[in-house]
Amino acid sequence: MSDRLQRGREKFEELYGAGKSQGLIEMQTGLAQDLARYGIEFNFGDIYARPGLTLAQREMATIAALVALGGLEPQLRGHTRGAIHAGLSATEILETVIHTVQYSGFPRALNAIRVVTDTLTELGVEIPPPLHPACDE
């Protein structure tokens, strides 16, 4: 096993749990498994393993990028789980999505916040109340 793949597996499993990197590879069929392995090597073995940012900070940046790109709901669900495992609070994750609205627009941010709140709920994480509750005036 290459050093990159080993580093990638360690970082991936730090976020998602023991054996999960192999599970990601095995989700693919045949030659497609190479792409999953490349993702673990590059994304987690090269990028996530770099010094300078904590794992939680990297997850925050990743969530912001996924929201801005839009249409990446499975990855957003996965990185929401990773963010919780990395130590981010529900408030930090939700505020990251809210922060992106100025750059990504309301449709992407609203779609993303639904994915994130559903994932947090599935994980048993309490969703914080709104800062400015709607009022009937």
Image (spheres, rainbow, N blue to C red):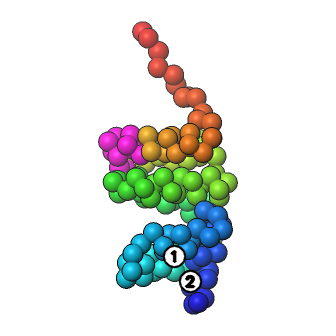
Within the magenta stretch, is there residue 66?
no
Relative height, residue 124 to residue 70 (above, below): above
Q: Residues within 10 Å of mark 1 (few under 14, many from 20)?
A: many
Tell me which residue sits at (48%, 52%) in the image.
77
Name the amino acid type tagged 1.
Answer: Ile
> Which segment did they paint magenta?
103-112
Q: Residue at the top extreme?
A: 137
How far is disc 1 from disc 2 in space, using C-alphas?
7 Å
Residue 122: quadrant of the picture: top right
Query: In this view of the protein, which residue sits in the foreground, 18 or 40?
Result: 18
Tell me which residue sits at (45%, 75%) in the image.
36
The residue tagged 2 is: 5
Q: Residues within 10 Å of mark 2 (few under 14, many from 20)?
A: many
Task: Please tell me how many numbered marks the rendered image carries.
Answer: 2
The residue tagged 1 is: 40
Q: Main secondary structure of the magenta part?
A: helix
Residue 15: quadrant of the picture: bottom right
Within the magenta stretch, is there residue 109?
yes
